[in-house]
Each structure stands twice: as structure tokens, then as C-alpha cells.
Image (tube, grey):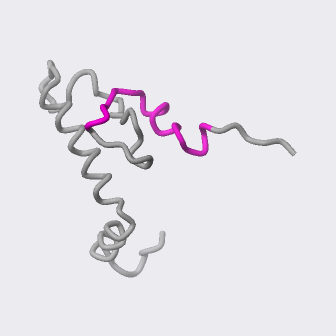
Amino acid sequence: MPYKNKPRPYKKEYKQQKEREEHSDRMERQRARRKMDKTGKDANKNGKADKREGKDIAHKKALSKGGSNKNGVTVQSRKKNRAAGGAMSSPKKKG
């Protein structure tokens, strides 16, 4: 717990995010989710498209590799999407 006795510096964190160019990627993900929710069927009226519930919106070309919503998005399980390109996707080396 790094901020036990002092308030969390949200402004500083936001500024750092913009400097690292993470802000635009987050906005791109958010636009993809909103578009899916707007166009998809929502039978239980909770604001999320039925096919997206419990799943992630994955970009066909990863945002970290220069992709965007124009390259296309798909619905994937959270486990599969979050493991792609991360530490879990490459096997551990023995030795």
C-alpha cells in the first residue's frame, strides 16, 4: 500500500500516463467497447452487449504494435486476451 498516509496523486499519474502515450491507447479501447455496446443486442438491459459480457474486446492488431480500431476488433475471453503478447504467452525456458 504505497499511499497509506497521504492522498493518491491522480493528477501526477494522469500526466505520466500521457507522457508514456498510454492515454490514447486507453481511449481507443474505450471507444471499441462503447461501439460494441451500442451496436450489439442487450437482452437483459444492463448496458453491455450480450456477446461481450464476461469477455474483452481484443484488437486484431495490438495497440502496442501500432493497431487501432480501424484494423478491427473481436470478442475474446479475458484470459486469452490478457495473455496474448504478455508473460503468459511465451513458454518458460529451462536451464
The image position of residue 81, as x and y in percent, is: 45, 34
Image quadrant in which you'd find residue 45: top left
Residue 78 relative to residue 87: left or right: left
In this view, the residue in front, 77 or 5, is 77
Q: Please, is residue 24 above or below residue 50 in the view?
A: below
Position of 44 relative to 93 (above/below): above
Please report the residue visible at 30 percent of the width from the left and 69 percent of the height from the top: 14
Query: 17 above or below 44?
Result: below
| Magenta span includes 77 | yes
Q: Position of residue 16 (x, y in %)?
A: 36, 72
Query: Residue at the bottom extreme?
Result: 6
Left or right position of 43 against 30: left
Quarter of image, res 22: bottom left
Left/right of residue 81 with respect to residue 47 in the rendered view: right
Q: Is residue 55 magenta?
A: no
Q: Which residues are magenta?
A: 70-89
Camera-side residue of 65 and 32:
65
Position of the C terminus by quadrant: top right
Q: Position of residue 40 (x, y in %)?
A: 17, 23
- Residue located at (27% from left, 75% from top): 11
Instruction: Write the residue at 55% across / 44% down.
Output: 86
